[in-house]
Image: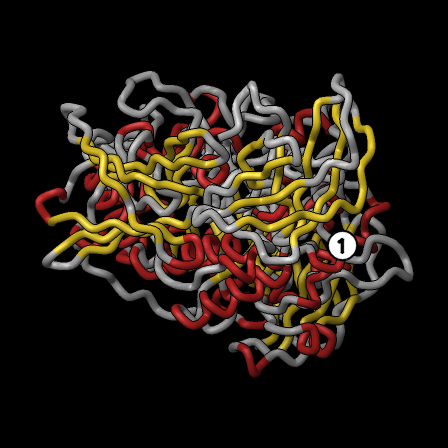
Amino acid sequence: MTSVNSPFEAYLDDLHTITILLPGDRQHSFKKTFTVTDEAGNESPLSMSDCYDIENFVKCICHSSIQLKAGERQVVTDSSGLSAELLMGAVIRTAAFDELYGYDGKLGVEFTEAQISLKVWVPTAVEVRLLLSDPAQQIIEMPMRKAGQGIWRAQTGVDQYGKFYKYRALINGKWREAADPYAKAVTINGEWGVLLNPADAQVDKIPVAPLNQVTDAIIYELHVRDFSIHENSGMSAKGKFKAFTEKNTASKKGFTTGMSYIKSLGVTHVELLPIYDFEGVKEGEEDGGYNWGYNPVHFNAPEGSYSTDPDNPMARIRELKECIQSLHENGLKMIMDGVYNHVYDMNLSSFEKLVPGYFFRMDEHGYPSNGTGVGNDFASERRMAKKFILDSVRYWLEEYDIDGIRFDLMGILDLDTMRKVRELAASIKEDAVLLGEGWDLSTPLGADRKTTIINAKKIPGVAFFNDRFRDVIKGSTFLHGDRGFSMGDEGKKDEALSAIKGIVQYSQGSVKWLEDPSQSVNYVESHDNHTFWDKLKIAVPDAPDEKLRQYQKLASSMVILSQGIPFLHAGQEFYRTKQGCENSYNQNDDINHLDWNMREAFEADIKEIRQLIQLRKSHGGFRLSSKEKVERHFHILPSPPYAIYYLLKNVGEYGNWSNILVIHQAWEFDTEFALPDEDEWEIAYSPGAQDGICLVEKGSVKLKNIGTYILFKP
């Protein structure tokens, strides 16, 4: 076993190559030879191909004619008889290692009437033990049996049901303790897994009408705690999954809140920010902190701070299932925020403890890559990392009955993994919605292999957040004073027209990176960055609030009516503010809560958003399913610089109207638009629905206010 007194260090870098590091402060004879001896005592000579100085060492590259193994005690000995244990090095990141030790079977805990079976993948360990504990911390230690492909197994009796468990593995000469990466139930604050079968938390599954096409979706993004924590939310289970099950809740003035309110909006999907077990909040403490949840710890176990009883691991499972089925009962589908691109702390994660260096990408210097900005990038391209993501996706779809996944920093994940996710999800739920952030981040993966927006054409069936839509309609997210078209910037009109069609083209003449509406998630506000209202306060500081509200309603209407998939941030419809905080991920409730007082104050404005959502749902012309249909029916009409004017032509096959006119006016001018013909047109929507705002005469339409106008021919 290697120790601080070992004469040298030896690392297995591929299945036939050993790197030996000799202390640089000693004299060495490079005529010396090395041998490697396995557990059975079989000795094999090594040949040396290179030897050179590096920092404080002499580095020797040696080769074995026989294939070496991981997870076995092997000793390297020099010609003078000095020896060191062979440690696992870069071999774990080779294709040959994946081929030899990749495993396709089930991992984690399985339950039968007779026994509980456990399997964990630790190909680097020479010994693994199962630790069992009860709440009194009486710990039992059991040896696990080694099987092929790096699998370690154990069985225990059903009398151990409900016990806590973790693994203890001897790797590279050191004992390491880790929770099961596949744990589906965990103790408070996630130190241990728990031998509980989530299927025992039985909650009846409620069917929801299938989604005919992805552009029928209207997504509403929500944080579990923000939803109910406000004193005027009318919900009693504040900050908990349980709040979603409360019926007919109302504010102090009698306005609908909670599930009744969301249902009344008419959205189709609720996307919940991370609901798995994450770091950043101390479970079980009244003031345990706040976090969005992008600190993954246990990917397959629900977050305890959202449970009414975080000490009871089954309670959080049952309450999350009830939350999801309550959404279904109200006709809403549920999208889970999946953060498979990184972990909270690489060195503390079970992945790194059990298979050091395997599950995370390394740069050219051997350090963890940091495209995510949080110190580690999950190596989705490796076989067992890919398997973990696929197994987790399957679990959430099947056990919790979710209806889709939003992939955080999806550009970190490789295309092959995301294609397999798409195929898997469709095989379980044909209408599952998959969307993600396709930003191109600096991670050691070829540009052609990343799931980025520039590669959208390579992965149909997965949608991308359209940041071009966001920045031309709202204004640059990162240039705080920059205005978008909805705030009156006429210079962004042409780009806004492209965005409305669901297209991303970053410069004139460039390749269209995104051109199919089924892949365009249109938004101007999300949990990230400033809310739209806070952005308005910075970008248009001297405008009265009434005008700012007109700008925001215009932007929201453009999100709802554009070709693609509309995405609304909770509270956007009533001018949500975070008091100017740009990154509220760990701020207090006063910054992050949904302010239900504002819901009371702006009922008339909310009514307009409901009306726009209903219009989108009532006519398929607003939600065409392919770029071919958009090109056939979407026609741009002449308009002044401060307005966008387009015709959805011959769309009678998608609804009761044969033709639809949409006008987005960003300035308060008296304007007259020529109608496409002399026929009679009717008004379906105008901002505020006030007298005199919109007047239709033969051959023309007159309007003056900032906002969106919709006309139609029956």
Judging from the image, what secondary structure is the residue with disc 1 in?
helix
Percent across and percent down for residue 664 are: 70, 53
Q: Taking the image as drawn, is residue 437 in sight?
A: no
Q: Residue furthest front?
A: 80
Percent across and percent down for residue 302 are: 33, 41
Question: What residue is shown with label 1?
Answer: 447
Query: For this rendering, which residue is in front, 17 or 166?
Result: 17
Q: Amino acid at mark 1?
A: Ala
Please report the residue visible at 56 percent of the width from the left and 32 percent of the height from the top: 84
156 relative to 676 in the view: left or right: left
Percent across and percent down for residue 162 are: 15, 40
395 relative to 529 in the view: left or right: left
Q: Residues within 10 Å of mark 1 (few under 14, many from 20)?
A: some
Please report the residue visible at 81 percent of the width from the left and 51 percent of the height from the top: 493
Percent across and percent down for residue 656 are: 52, 77
Please report the residue visible at 44 percent of the width from the left and 58 percent of the height from the top: 149
Q: Taking the image as drawn, is residue 362 in sight?
A: yes
Q: Residue furthest right?
A: 509
Q: Residue furthest bottom?
A: 653
Rendered view: 617 above or below 273: below
Query: For this rendering, which residue is in front, 7 or 350?
Result: 7
